[in-house]
Image: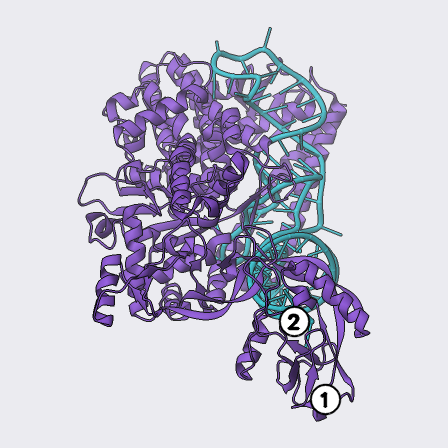
Amino acid sequence: MLDKAFDPKTAEPRLYAAWEASGAFAPNGDPDAPSFSIAIPPPNVTGALHIGHALNNTLQDVLTRFARMKGDAALWLPGTDHAGIATQMVVERQLASEGNIGRRDLGREAFVERVWAWKDTYGGLISSQLRRLGASCDWSRERFTLDEGLSAAVRKVFVTLHRQKLVYRDKRLVNWDPHFQTAISDLEVEQREVDGFYWHFAYPLEDGTGEIVVATTRPETMLADTAVAVHPRDPRYAGLIGHCVRLPIVGRPIPIIADDYADPEKGSGAVKITPAHDFNDFKVGQRHRLPMINILTPDGRINDAAPAEYRGLDRVAARAKVVSAFETLGLLRAIEPTRHAVPHADRSGVVVEPYLTDQWWVDAKTLAGPAIAAVEDGRTVFEPRSWEKTYFEWMRNIEPWCVSRQLWWGHRIPAWYGPDGKIFVAETEAEAAAAAHEHYGRDEPLRQDDDVLDTWFSSALWPFSTLGWPGRTADLARFYPTHTLVTGFDIIFFWVARMMMMGLHFTGEAPFRRVFINALIRDATGAKMSKSKGNVMDPLELIDAYGADALRFTLTAMSGQARDIKLSTPRIEGYRNFSTKLWNAARFGEMNGCIAVPDFEPGAVRGVMNRWMLGETVKAARTITQALETCAFDEAAAALYRFIWNVHCDWYLELAKPVLAGGDEAAKAETRAMAAWTLETILLLLHPVMPFVTEELWDKTGAAARLGPLIVAVWPRLPEGWVDPSAEAEIGWLVGLVTEVRQLRADTGVPQSARPVLTLVGAGEATAERLSRHGDLIVTLARLHAIELGEAAPGGSALFVAGDATGALAIADHIDLSVERMRLSRDIAARGADIDRTVRKLGNADFVARAPAEVVEENRERLSEAQAALAKLDAALARLDALV
RNA sequence: GGGCGGCUAGCUCAGCUGGUCAGAGCGCCUGGUUUACACCCAGGAGGUCGGGGGUUCGAACCCCUCGCCGCCCACCA
């Protein structure tokens, strides 16, 4: 006997352990099976499972389990990302909390060892949390971006790209994070709106004949100004081009140059040019061959290129000092408050400085071409499609990708420098040494580049590096390209685009056929979840409270939303109730001897209600299958919910009760077998979304003993021929009649305990026949005393429309006539309005002429039905009036 | 400045290619000890589908326009 309810707390760990031990997570060994693979978006090793992971991984698991059941060789390959800055940050913080030894004091080697130790201790957390969610990943293939195989892939890619001149070293302006003292890519820069000022400074002309006013939000950069630019056709400055101003404080003469970059509409029309500390100015500087003066140290202080009194000052202090110097000099012309965007580093949160350094760059423009083409011609499809536009927009305007980071935790760049600075890029130190020997004609000491690669560099290789590339492994042949990538829109640029570029470049094939972009989860009020706001929903707490199945179903059901999911606990609770409902349906089956019959032929059932249920099951399976195939997760969830609760529980089991309690042994046996078959089919269909409760019921109802575990059971493929329209019509009639009676009872206030007689007046032969088959059922479901056919409505009954007949419910003893009159009047009014609308429509010559014939016909039928119904209602009202 | 979403019952959202599409869940109200389930059962109220205009025989659905809300990219004169 099943317990009163499913207990996720004890069952889930047990079931998961059994799955994992069974080896079911590994792709099946059938060489003819189509392959289906998903590479997990590798969470940071530092990470803990948050609600976004829960959504993302639930959907991947749904797809994987669905594919596995369909018989595909399904592989969901898990792993984690070393997450350069994030991890280094965590360990540095740990060091600080333990006793102030900075990473620099520790030294590179010891520090990296510390990080590995940290990873070994805490890095497995996210994997165990994914298990709690029910993720059916093939843990035997778990990878880490810094493991040996993936590191080899990274070196191979870097060296190859370098040889192809798609990776190069260049001195350019980069986004510099003064906190971590590393370059970061454009994508790691986040614009934040900040209150600030435009300071308007006067720069005196060198010949003393006047001044030019320029404005800036970053006064300290003036120390590095090397020109003032004006527009070539700006009449105000026409005579000054080629002259010089004397840069205040510094005392350096700098030229007034003509450049289109200066916008006459903005400010004074003259703009200070600081090529070493501004991206736009850098370009101007290159055009005019201006000196590039760097005035900052790596940690954001003023360096020795500035006047003595500024050296060593923090950039904030330097700003204040520059402003006050201008004031003292009488050259501060205005202070204008403004609110403007300032670039911040997304990890450290400090203001980013454009900074002139040597870095390694990837020629993204060249790599982007094929990646754009692959989406254009549909080799890779985004779902929803609208994201393709975002992808194209970025890819078509892509800038060189700065891939070097001045960090220690990551893939060290495989480049070695000779004594003269000559660079040798090679996969190993030995190869670099050999190349150096050849170059110098003798052995020379080499020094490896200190920098590591951007974390996303290794992530970009993930779909193929995890399968063994550059080896030509069996996994690579079988599972690459992967089938679907499930990820958030926030990393389309960071990750998806780069995987497309690298995948195409190195394997010739796009790394995935489909990219499903899932929404972002917000709290119930629509706010972004963040620790500081305290509105974070912890998926593990939700699993503790409601079970993993409930959380998974909720996330699946809500995943159709384009951008945001507002998650709230009542919704999760509702789906927990749903799983309990299913559990109880199984319990009902168990109590009534609904045991699966081994060679049961669903197509051969005779009972009308069983044939109806068979058709409903076919339709539900069709809808769910199609939805899962097209990533319409919300539709799949809705179809499951409706089918299980509103069809199976509300109607089928209710219809089955009298049969199961009755005396007809043949009908009873068939219904038992059918109920068992239906439940098994439900478990199959629901399993991808709610794996735990379904697996448990599969086992408890004996299906597992017959067919093996549900996780590898065969997905239902049900013939459309099993849909029986006549059974559909008949049960539809029954359901309609029962519902009518229930509504009428409730409307007129007939007590639940009352058992009135229902008479069907004017019923046709077909109806009479149906009644003979289902009369007892209707009596039970509608809580009647009896149901009979009659020529005329008995006195004291309330009348309603019942298909071709008029229903007469004998309730005079129970009801208030005025209530009944109101009910009839309301129904008459509603029918009348409907008839008016339809008459008007059919009276419109254009409609009849232009609308498709079937639509016109539909409306004609609708009209005649409504008119017949109205006539009955009118008669009922007249009769009621006569009664009074 | 460029682009993308959203605005449908009190709340959260479905409504796919224009013709029973005005829906679901939650909440609310009424009534229920029907032997699977109160994490339940039966029923109900509630919306001029953001405003305006247009196309069409017909528009929540297409076009234009306005208004809010949110996001992405660019912008440090």
- Residue drawn at point x = 46 percent, y = 17 percent: A5
In the image as oriented, which residue stretches furthest toward the bottom?
A239
Name the image quarter holding the C terminus of chain A: top right
N-terminal of the pair, mark 2 or mark 1, is 2
User: What percent of the width, then of the height, locates residue B3?
Assistant: 57, 65
Please, which chain is the residue tagged with disc 1 on?
A
* Number of callouts: 2
- Residue drawn at point x = 30 percent, y = 61 percent: A446
Kindly state the secondary structure of the residue where label 2 is placed.
helix
Q: Is residue A785 above or below residue A456?
A: above
- What's the colour of chain B in the image? cyan
Quadrant of res A197: bottom right
Residue A192 located left or right of residue A384: right
| Residue hosting label 2 | A223
Q: Is residue A758 visible?
A: yes
User: What percent of the width, then of the height, locates residue A656?
Assistant: 42, 21
Q: Nearer the viewer, residue A511 or A721?
A: A511
| Residue hosting label 1 | A237
- What's the colour of chain A in the image? purple
Q: Amino acid at mark 1?
A: Tyr
Quadrant of res A864: top right
User: What percent of the width, then of the height, locates residue A530?
Assistant: 60, 41
Q: Nearer the viewer, residue A95 or A34?
A: A95
Kindly state the secondary structure of the residue where label 1 is placed.
loop
User: What percent of the width, then of the height, locates residue A23?
Assistant: 26, 31
Q: Is residue A204 above or below residue A878?
A: below
Q: Is residue A719 visible?
A: no
Q: Nearer the viewer, residue A348 or A796?
A: A348
Name the image quarter holding the N terminus of chain A: top left
Q: Gap in Å between the C-alphas at discs 2 and 1?
A: 23 Å
Residue contact between numbered discs 2 and 1, judged by CB atoms under 8 Å: no
